[in-house]
Image: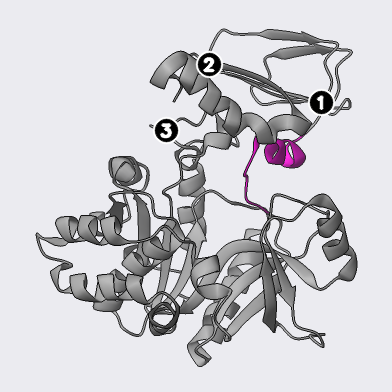
Amino acid sequence: MHTMDKTYYCVIMAGGIGSRFWPVSRSDMPKQFLDILGVGRTLIQQTFDRFTKIIPDENIYVVTNEEYSSIVHEQLPKVPVENILGEPMRRNTAPCIMYANCKIGLKNPDAKIVVTPADHLILNEDLFLDNITEGLEFVTESNALLTLGITPNRPATGYGYIQMSENAENQKFIPVKTFTEKPQLELAKFFLESGDFLWNSGIFLWKQTSIRDAIKNHLKELYSLFSEGIKNFNTPREKETITEIYSGAKSISIDFGVMEKESNVYVMQTNFGWSDLGTWNSLYTIANRDENGNTDLYKNTLFANSNGNYVNIQGDNKIAIIRDLDDFIVVDTDKALLICKRENEQTLTEMLNDAKVKFGEGIK
C-alpha cells in the first residue's frame, strides 16, 4: 500500500492526435482515449488508475487540446473539472508543462510534480509506483530535474536516448550527460552496446519551483508570457488569456527547451516494462501471439500459411480470412482499412497526408 502525500501532484499530457494509430485513432478520438489494448480501459484511464494509487484525485491535472476536454471529463469523472486544462492550439510540451505548473503553483507552491504522457504502457505497476515515489522523494530533497530512463533491450530507433555520466555504478540517481533524439539504426546499436544510454521515457519529476526557475532561465519568452498572464488564471478571463499566451508562444518541447540545456538534470535507471505505444508495430511487440507469430485482437480471423501479422478487425459480425501473408499490419474499421507491411509503417503519416489530398478531410 502506498502512502498518499498531499504535496504530490501529477500532470497527464493528453493533447496528441495519435496519427500513427490511424484508422482506429482519428483526430476527433485520438489513441489516448481508446482501449487500444483491448483491456476494458482506455490508455488515459489506465494512466489515471495507476497514479491515483499514490496521488490524491484532486491533485491530478490533465492538459489536453480543448476540443478533447469533454472526452477527458467523460472518461475521468474523478478529476475535478477545473483540473482539465484545455489548450487552444498545439504547442508541444513546454507550454503545456508551464500552464499546468502555474495552476499547481497557485494552489500549492510546495508541490512536487510528476509529468507523464497519457498513452504509455507500464507492465510492472508496483515497481513503477515504487520508482515514482522514490523519484518524488529525491526531488523533494533537491532542486534537480529528474527523468526516468528505461534500460534498453534492443536498438530501437523510435525512442530518444539519455546518456548517463560516467562512473555512475550503483547510483540510483545519475547525472545526465546528453540527450539524443531518435537515432539511426547504427547509432542505436552503438548506444545499446556502450551501456551508457537509456531510453527517454518522457516521464519527468520535479518541484514546482525547480521547473519554473529552469523555464525562466532557458525559455525566457515563454516564462514572461505566463508571468504576465497568471493574474487572470482562476478568473473568467483565463481562457482568453491562455489563447493570447499560446498565440505568442513558440512550439517547443521541454526536452529541447529545458532538459538539454539545464545542468542540474538527473536520470533514474528503471526497468518496469515500458512502451510508449507509438505505433502499431509497438503493439505487435507486446501482444500475445499465436505459434505463427500472429496477433488477432478480436479473435475473428482465420489464418492460413501466414506469419508475423498484427490484425485488428472491428465489427460485431465481421470475420476475416488471411492467407499467405507475412509480417503485415491489417486494421479495419467501419470507415477505413489499413494494410501495410510492418517494417514500412513509419511511412503511414506521409501516406495519410497523401490520402487527405486525394479524399479530402473525410480521412481524418
Q: Residues within 10 Å of mark 1 (few under 14, many from 20)?
A: some
Q: Which residue is mark 2?
A: 336
Q: Is residue 24 visible?
A: yes
Tell me what residue is drawn at x 32 percent, y 49 percent. Answer: 89
The answer, for residue 23, to whether it is visible in the render is no
Image quarter for residue 256?
Answer: bottom right
The amino acid pointed to by label 3 is: Ser
Are the residues tagged 3 and 2 within 8 Å (C-beta)? no
Q: Quadrant of residue 192?
A: bottom right
Quadrant containing the N terminus is bottom right
Of label 1 and label 3, which has the lower sequence position? 3
Q: Outermost residue toward the bottom?
A: 141
- Which residue lies under the disc numbered 3? 27
Please state if 226 lies on the left or on the right of 50 as rendered: left
Compute the Cα span from label 3 to label 2: 14 Å
First in sequence, mark 3 or 2: give its number.
3
Q: Is residue 190 magenta?
A: no
The span picked out in magenta is 275-288
Q: Is the residue marked by circle 3 packed among few (<14), some (14-19), or many (20+) residues within 10 Å? A: some
Q: CA distance from mark 2 to mark 1?
A: 20 Å
Q: Is residue 276 above or below residue 250?
A: above
Residue to which mark 1 is pinned? 327
Badge 2 or badge 1: first in the primary sequence: 1
Residue 30 figure quarter: top left
Q: Position of residue 362 (x, y in %)?
A: 41, 18
In the image, taking residue 246 as reference, residue 219 lies left or right, namely right
Report the front residue among 211 and 334: 211
Q: Residue at x 43, y 68 (%)?
A: 55
Secondary structure of the residue carrying numbered label 2? loop
Q: Nearer the viewer, residue 340 or 284?
A: 340
